[in-house]
């Protein structure tokens, strides 16, 4: 099954400094048909104005992955972690038993991020944070794993859940495959460009929910940057 969720149909909230689009129910946007996709709970498409951001606030029992599309985001938390994650790179916060954090765009330009929340498989553990560069050139033409709950994904950021976040950059006309398995659920969003999955055209920032598919085969119609969550 392949279900297209056009960008124009997503939930939205514009706070001035933050223009947010919600692929799933979040905040004031509620759709009982879009509460989650497997253990994937949130996929927010956030545009953050320069020198603004999310002030300190608490989380617990959630894996929070931030994929930076443009600009940069600066993280600070109650564990003493502080770091700047820029376009193409990823940060992961395992909220665990509880943590307070802030996420600010300290840049002079607009920052655009995907914020992805996945329900953890393991709980009761201390919170943690990490970030890593993933140069777009190193994922040209194929999918690479950015964050993973599996020990054999040594180069990926660790998350405490039965899921992977993978990404690829494709030139127009190029194709890539990802073996997901028919018992899994995939959720894919092109950050840029346009792609084709079977006979479905997916534009930049559209979502597509995938199930009962063994291998995901994607072809780029335009130069594209693709992010995919492989969820339980």
Image (cartoon, rainbow, N blue to C red):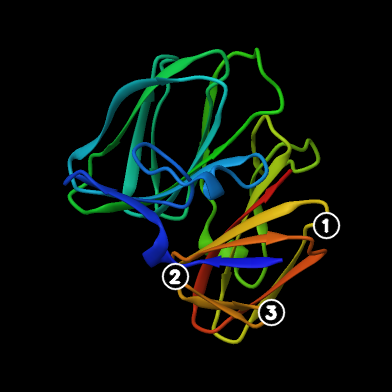
Q: CA distance from mark 2 to mark 1?
A: 25 Å
Q: Position of residue 67 (x, y in %)?
A: 47, 48
In the picture, residue 27 is in which quadrant? top left
Q: Nearer the viewer, residue 72 or 149?
A: 149
Question: In the rendered picture of this protein, how many numbered marks are placed on residues?
Answer: 3
Q: Position of residue 127 (x, y in %)?
A: 55, 18
Q: Secondary structure at mark 2?
A: loop
The residue at the point 63 percent across, 47 percent down is 37
Mark 1 Cα shell of 10 Å, populated few (<14), some (14-19), many (≥20): some
Mark 3 Cα shell of 10 Å, populated few (<14), some (14-19), many (≥20): few
The N terminus appears in which quarter of the rendering? bottom right
Location of mark 2 (residue): 204
Residue that extends furthest to the front in the rendered view of this protein:
32
Q: Secondary structure at mark 1?
A: loop
The numbered mark, 2 or 1, whose residue comes first in the sequence reads 1
Location of mark 3 (residue): 198
Q: CA distance from mark 1 to mark 3?
A: 16 Å
Q: Which mark is residue 181?
A: 1
The numbered mark, 1 or 3, whose residue comes first in the sequence reads 1
The residue at the point 38 percent across, 23 percent down is 101
């Amino acid at each position: 099954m392949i279900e297209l969720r056009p960008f124009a149909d997503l939930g939205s909230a514009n706070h001035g400094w933050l223009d947010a689009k919600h692929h799933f129910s979040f905040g004031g946007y509620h759709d009982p048909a879009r509460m989650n996709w497997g253990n994937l709970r949130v996929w927010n498409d956030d545009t953050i104005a320069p020198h603004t951001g999310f002030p300190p606030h608490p989380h617990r029992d959630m894996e929070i992955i931030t994929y930076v599309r443009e600009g940069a985001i600066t993280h600070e938390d109650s564990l003493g972690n502080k770091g700047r994650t820029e376009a193409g790179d990823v940060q992961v916060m395992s909220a665990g038993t509880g943590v307070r954090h802030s996420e600010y765009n300290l840049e002079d330009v607009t920052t655009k991020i995907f914020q992805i929340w996945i329900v953890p498989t393991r709980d009761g553990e201390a919170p943690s944070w990490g970030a890593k560069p993933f140069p777009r050139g190193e994922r040209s033409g194929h999918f690479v794993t950015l964050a993973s709950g599996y020990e054999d994904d040594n180069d990926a950021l660790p998350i405490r859940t039965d899921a992977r976040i993978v990404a690829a950059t494709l030139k127009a006309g190029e194709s890539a495959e990802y073996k997901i398995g028919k018992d899994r659920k995939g959720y894919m969003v092109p950050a840029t460009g346009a792609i084709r999955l079977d006979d479905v055209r997916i534009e930049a920032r559209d979502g597509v929910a995938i199930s009962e598919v063994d291998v995901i085969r994607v072809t780029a119609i335009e130069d594209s940057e693709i992010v995919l969550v492989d969820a339980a």
